[in-house]
């Protein structure tokens, strides 16, 4: 059950259609010979665009969250994992990670089960959400994207269905109430951008 998280629970669940996108600034131009030189920056953030499950008797939690946080407050999101990764992983638990700043491969220790590529992870010493780029069963090396922003050394790792990310509401999101059929709060499409 992925969605907007507050006070130890999801207060508004994401529903389909939903998109999780990686935003990396890229500079590109076409030359007269129609070749296309490109270069990418190292900055990266995750962006989620989704609808929320319509709410009725518990709509006040989401309403307060939208109004109080507005476009400047940080909102916690229980990261939606890739469906293919969920099906492939089975039961995964625990784990710590080690790696230096700008590393794209880290070492995992103390983890049991399979963590397939495409799994979102987060480390306890910083708030950036990463994605695995290779499979890892048990201890060993695993690729991540983007490169590590902060070094980790035996740092606790969240993976699977317990990865919380810090996001902000995008400017197109309604920060108030919108009702359908008089009793169901439905704010339409919500866009959240990772707080980097």
Image: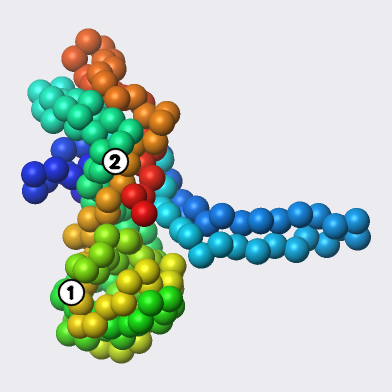
Please tell me whether mark 1 sits on a helix, a strand or a loop: strand
Please tell me whether mark 2 sits on a helix, a strand or a loop: strand
- For this view, does 151 lie left or right of residue 184? right
- Quarter holding the C terminus is bottom left
The dot on residue 14 is: 2
Look at the image and tell me whether residue 139 can be seen: yes
Look at the image and tell me whether residue 159 can be seen: no
x, y percent for residue 55: 19, 26
x, y percent for residue 139: 25, 88
Quarter of the image holding residue 107?
bottom left
- For this view, does 155 lie left or right of residue 135? left
Q: Which residue is drawn at 23% across and 26% down?
A: 67
Direction bottom: furthest residue:
140
Question: Callout 2 environment at 10 Å: few (<14), some (14 to 19), or many (20+)?
Answer: many
Give the Cα separation between the discs numbered 1 and 2: 27 Å
Q: Which residue is drawn at 38% across and 77% down?
A: 101
Q: Which residue is drawn at 16% across and 27% down?
A: 64
Here the colouring is rainbow
Task: Give the vertical position of 95 relative to 145 (above or below).
Answer: below
Task: Give the vertical position of 122 relative to 103 (above or below).
Answer: above
Residue linked to disc 1: 156
Quarter of the image holding residue 145?
bottom left
């Amino acid at each position: 059950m992925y969605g907007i998280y507050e006070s130890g629970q999801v207060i508004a669940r994401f529903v389909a259609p939903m998109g999780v996108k990686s935003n990396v600034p890229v500079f590109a131009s076409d030359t007269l010979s129609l070749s296309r030189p490109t270069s990418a920056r190292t900055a990266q953030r995750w962006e989620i665009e989704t609808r929320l499950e319509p709410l009725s008797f518990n709509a006040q939690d989401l309403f307060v969250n939208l109004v109080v946080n507005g476009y400047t407050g940080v909102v916690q999101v229980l990261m939606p994992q890739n469906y293919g990764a969920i099906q492939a992983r089975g039961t995964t638990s625990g784990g710590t990670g080690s790696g230096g700043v700008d590393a794209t491969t880290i070492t995992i220790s103390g983890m049991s089960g399979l963590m397939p590529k495409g799994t979102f992870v987060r480390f306890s010493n910083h708030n950036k959400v990463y994605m695995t780029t290779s499979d890892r069963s048990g201890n060993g090396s695993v690729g991540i994207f983007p490169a590590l922003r902060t070094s980790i050394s035996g740092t606790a790792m969240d993976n699977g269905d317990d990865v919380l990310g810090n996001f902000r509401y995008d400017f197109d999101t309604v920060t108030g109430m919108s009702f359908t059929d008089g009793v169901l709060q439905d704010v339409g499409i919500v866009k959240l951008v990772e707080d980097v």
